[in-house]
C-alpha cells in the first residue's frame, strides 16, 4: 500500500464509522453497470403529479426556468447590473466561456425560502436521480451554478442577516464572540451594510459586493483586506447545511467537524446546500486607504525600470498586513495602481507613498500619466456606504435595498464572455533580492502576451501569524500562506448570452485571446513551477485541478465527500469527487484519480 492510499484510509475510517449505515456505501455500491441521472427526455423523468407534489412541499415556489432572453430583449442597463442578473432564475454573472460552457436554464427551479424547502428539493432530486444544481448569486466563472436538464436549487430569496454581540456555536463551550449570521442568498454588501455601516465593525468577506456569501466562504474567500484578516473561510464559526441524505445539519468545530473543515475552502457545490453561515466579526479600523494611478512608460527599457523600482518599493514598504488589492501590468507598458490599505491614517498613507512619487518625478521624461497617481485614507465606516463612496454604482431599480451597489472597477466582469482565464500563486521567495529580477522579467515577458493582474491580498505571506494559523486549519491549498500574490491573467468581451441580439463572436480573435492567456501564464510558471491556483478564479481546462486547488488537502477532502455524499448527488466541474463523473455530471464513470 502506498503512502497516499494509506493516508486516505486513515482519514476516511473514523468518518465512516461515525455515520449512519445508509451513508456508508460507496458510489455505485447498490447499482449494477453504468449509472446515469435522468433527463426530461427519459421515461423515468418525474410525472406532472410528482412535480405538483414537490411544488406543494415548497410552498408554491417551484418555477419553470427560462433562458435569460427567452421573453425578449433586456435593457443595456439591466444587462450590466449584477444584481439584476442574480435576480433571474436563468441568470448567470458570466455569459459563457469559449469552448467550455454556455449558460443553460434548468428544467425547474425551487426558489427556496427556508431550510425545509431545501430539504424537500434535495430529497426529490436524490429519489428521482436528477442532476441537482445549486445557485445563490450565480457568480461562478466555471459555470457551476447552471446546467441544462437539471433541478435548480435557488437560494437567492434567503437573505436574512443577523448581527450578534455574543455568539457561541451549537454544542460548544467556547467563549462568546461578536459575529454575523447570513442566509445563503445574502451577498456581501448585505453584510457590509449591517456589520460596518450600521454597527461599526468588520467582517472578512469578498471584494465584489454582489458575490454570494455562502459560495465565497466555501471557496476560501478573499477580500480587499485579506492581507491582514486572512480568508473568509477562516472566520466561519458555524454553518447549516442540507446534506445528500436530506438532513439539515448544524456543523461547527464540535459537530461534524470534518464536514465543517471541508466547507472552509473545499469548494462550493460539492458538500450539500449551505443555508446559513455565521462568521466572526472584528473591531473596525478607523481608516481604510487607497493608492491609485496609471503610469505609462515611454519604452520597454523604461517599463522594466519602473517594474524594478515598484517591486523594490513593494518589498520594502507595502509587503505587510496593511496593504492589499492589486496592480495591473499591461502590454502597453502601463502599470496601473489599485491598492488599498487598512489601519493607516491619511498622513501615514501620503508619507509612505511620497518617495515613489518623487522617483517618478525624477524620471519624468520616461513616464506619462493617464490617471495621475495619488494616495489617501478615508473613514472605514463609510467604505461601503453609497452616500459616502463615489466609487460604487448604486442599483437603480425601484424596490431594491437602497444600500445595494457594486464597485465601478468590477463593472467589466458583469456579463463577461471569457476567452481564457488562469491564476497562479506566486511564492514570496520571488521578492527576495536574489530572485526579484527574475520576477520582474517573468512579469514583463507575460505582459507581452496579455495584461497581468497581481492581487496582493490573495496571498497571505506577510499576513499576521494569527491569520496564517487560522488559514492552515481550513481546506485551502496550504500554498496560499507562502504566496505574496495571486497572478490573474484573463481576456474576453462584453455580454454574449444565448439569444442576445449582437454581432457574431469572432472565433479567430477569441482563440487568439485564449492563446495569449496561455502564453502569459506559461511565462509566470517558469519562475513558479508547480504553483497552485485559486478555485474560484482559475482555468476551466486545468488538468491538474485537484493539486492546484487543494494540494495535500485533496485526499482528506475525498474522504469527507465519500462519507457525506457517497452517491455523488452534488457535482460541480472540477469539484471534489468530480473525477468519477462525465463532464456534464450525468454519467458515473470508473473513479479515475485526478492528477
Image: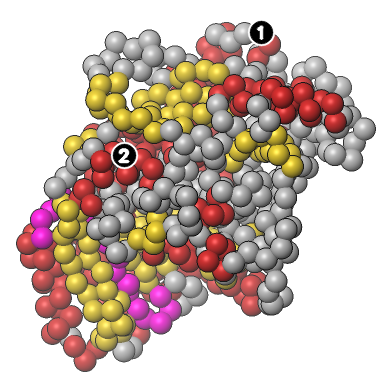
Q: Earlier in the sequence, mark 2 or mark 1?
A: 1
The N terminus appears in which quarter of the rendering? top right
Q: Nearer the viewer, residue 493 or 519?
A: 493
Tell me which segment is drawn in magenta. 330-346
Q: Position of residue 208 (x, y in %)?
A: 41, 53
Quarter of the figure that contains the C terminus:
top right
Residue 535 visible (yes or no): yes
Horizontally, residue 144 falls left or right of residue 463, namely right
Residue annotated with mark 2: 194
Query: Which label lies toward us, 2 or 1?
Result: 2
Q: Are marks 2 and 1 in contact (CB under 8 Å)?
A: no
Question: Who is closer to the viewer here, 448 or 190?
Answer: 190
Depth order, front residue of 481/284: 284
Vertical order, 448 against 278 (above or below): below
Q: Residues within 10 Å of mark 1 (few under 14, many from 20)?
A: few
Instruction: Decide if residue 520 is on the left or right side of residue 453.
Output: right
Residue 349: x, y in percent? 13, 61
Q: How is the rendered protein coloured? A: secondary structure
Q: Which residue does the image show at 47% across and 50% down from the upper left?
A: 399
Image vertical order of residue 210 relative to residue 511, above or below: above
Q: Is residue 84 magenta?
A: no
Q: Residue 41, located in which quarter of the rendered image?
A: top right
Q: Which residue, as the protein is rendered here, is positioned at the far front?
A: 398
Mark 1: secondary structure: helix
Residue 320 visible in the current orientation? no
Q: Which residue is mark 1?
A: 21
Q: CA distance from mark 2 to mark 1?
A: 43 Å
Determine whether, in the image, residue 432 is placed left or right of residue 451: left
Residue at horizontal 36 percent and vertical 40 percent from the top: 191
Q: Please, what secondary structure does the residue beneath circle 2 have?
A: helix
Residue at figure coordinates x 41%, y 82% from the top left = 332
Amino acid at each position: 500500500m502506498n503512502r497516499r492510499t494509506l493516508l486516505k484510509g486513515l482519514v476516511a475510517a473514523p468518518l465512516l464509522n461515525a455515520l449512519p449505515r445508509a451513508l456508508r456505501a460507496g458510489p455505485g455500491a447498490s447499482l449494477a453497470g453504468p449509472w446515469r441521472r435522468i433527463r426530461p427526455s427519459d421515461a423515468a423523468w418525474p410525472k406532472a403529479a410528482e412535480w405538483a407534489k414537490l411544488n406543494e412541499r415548497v410552498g408554491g415556489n417551484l418555477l419553470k426556468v427560462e433562458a435569460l432572453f427567452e421573453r425578449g430583449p433586456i435593457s443595456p442597463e439591466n444587462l450590466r447590473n449584477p444584481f439584476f442578473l442574480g435576480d433571474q432564475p436563468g441568470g448567470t454573472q458570466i455569459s459563457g466561456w469559449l469552448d467550455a460552457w454556455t449558460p443553460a436554464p434548468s428544467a425547474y427551479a425551487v426558489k427556496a425560502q427556508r431550510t425545509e424547502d431545501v430539504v424537500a428539493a434535495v430529497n426529490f432530486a436524490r429519489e428521482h436521480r436528477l442532476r441537482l444544481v445549486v445557485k445563490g448569486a450565480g457568480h461562478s466563472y466555471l459555470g457551476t451554478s447552471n446546467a441544462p436538464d437539471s433541478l435548480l436549487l435557488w437560494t437567492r430569496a434567503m437573505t436574512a442577516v443577523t448581527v450578534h454581540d455574543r455568539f457561541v456555536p451549537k454544542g460548544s463551550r467556547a467563549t462568546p464572540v461578536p459575529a454575523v449570521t447570513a442566509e445563503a442568498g445574502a451577498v456581501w454588501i448585505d453584510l457590509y451594510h449591517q456589520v460596518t455601516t450600521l454597527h461599526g465593525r468588520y467582517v472578512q468577506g469578498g471584494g465584489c459586493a454582489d458575490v454570494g456569501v455562502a459560495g465565497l466562504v466555501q471557496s476560501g474567500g478573499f477580500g480587499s483586506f485579506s492581507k491582514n484578516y486572512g480568508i473568509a473561510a477562516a472566520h466561519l464559526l458555524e454553518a447549516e447545511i442540507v446534506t445528500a441524505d436530506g438532513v439539515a445539519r448544524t456543523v461547527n468545530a464540535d459537530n461534524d467537524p470534518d464536514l465543517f473543515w471541508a466547507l472552509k475552502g473545499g469548494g462550493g457545490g460539492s458538500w450539500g446546500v449551505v443555508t446559513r453561515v455565521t462568521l466572526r466579526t472584528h473591531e473596525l479600523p478607523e481608516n481604510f486607504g487607497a493608492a491609485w494611478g496609471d503610469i505609462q512608460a515611454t519604452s520597454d527599457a523604461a517599463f522594466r525600470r519602473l517594474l524594478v523600482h515598484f517591486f523594490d518599493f513593494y518589498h520594502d514598504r507595502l509587503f505587510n498586513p496593511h496593504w492589499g488589492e492589486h496592480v495591473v501590468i499591461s502590454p502597453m507598458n502601463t502599470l496601473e495602481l489599485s491598492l488599498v490599505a487598512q489601519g493607516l491614517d491619511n498622513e501615514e498613507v501620503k508619507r509612505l507613498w511620497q518617495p515613489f512619487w518623487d522617483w517618478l518625478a525624477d524620471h519624468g521624461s520616461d513616464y506619462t500619466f493617464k490617471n495621475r497617481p495619488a494616495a489617501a485614507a478615508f473613514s472605514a465606516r463609510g467604505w461601503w456606504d453609497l452616500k459616502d463612496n463615489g466609487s460604487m454604482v448604486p442599483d437603480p431599480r425601484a424596490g431594491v435595498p437602497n444600500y445595494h451597489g457594486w464597485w465601478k472597477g468590477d463593472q467589466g466582469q458583469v456579463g463577461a464572455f471569457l476567452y481564457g482565464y488562469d491564476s497562479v500563486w506566486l511564492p514570496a521567495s520571488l521578492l527576495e533580492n536574489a530572485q526579484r529580477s527574475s520576477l520582474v522579467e517573468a512579469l514583463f515577458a507575460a505582459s507581452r502576451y496579455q495584461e497581468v493582474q497581481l492581487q496582493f491580498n490573495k496571498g497571505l505571506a506577510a499576513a499576521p501569524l494569527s491569520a496564517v494559523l487560522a488559514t492552515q486549519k481550513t481546506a485551502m491549498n496550504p500554498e496560499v500562506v507562502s504566496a505574496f500574490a495571486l497572478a490573474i491573467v484573463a481576456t474576453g468581451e462584453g455580454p454574449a448570452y444565448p439569444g442576445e441580439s449582437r454581432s457574431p463572436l469572432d472565433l479567430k480573435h477569441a482563440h487568439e485571446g485564449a492563446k495569449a492567456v496561455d502564453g502569459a501564464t506559461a511565462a509566470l510558471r517558469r519562475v513558479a513551477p508547480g504553483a497552485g491556483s485559486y478555485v474560484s478564479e482559475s482555468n476551466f481546462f486545468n488538468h491538474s485541478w485537484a493539486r492546484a486547488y487543494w494540494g495535500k488537502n485533496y485526499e482528506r477532502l475525498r474522504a469527507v465527500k465519500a462519507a457525506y455524499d457517497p452517491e455523488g448527488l452534488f457535482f460541480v466541474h472540477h469539484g471534489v469527487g468530480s473525477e468519477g463523473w462525465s463532464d456534464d455530471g450525468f454519467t458515473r464513470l470508473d473513479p479515475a484519480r485526478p492528477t
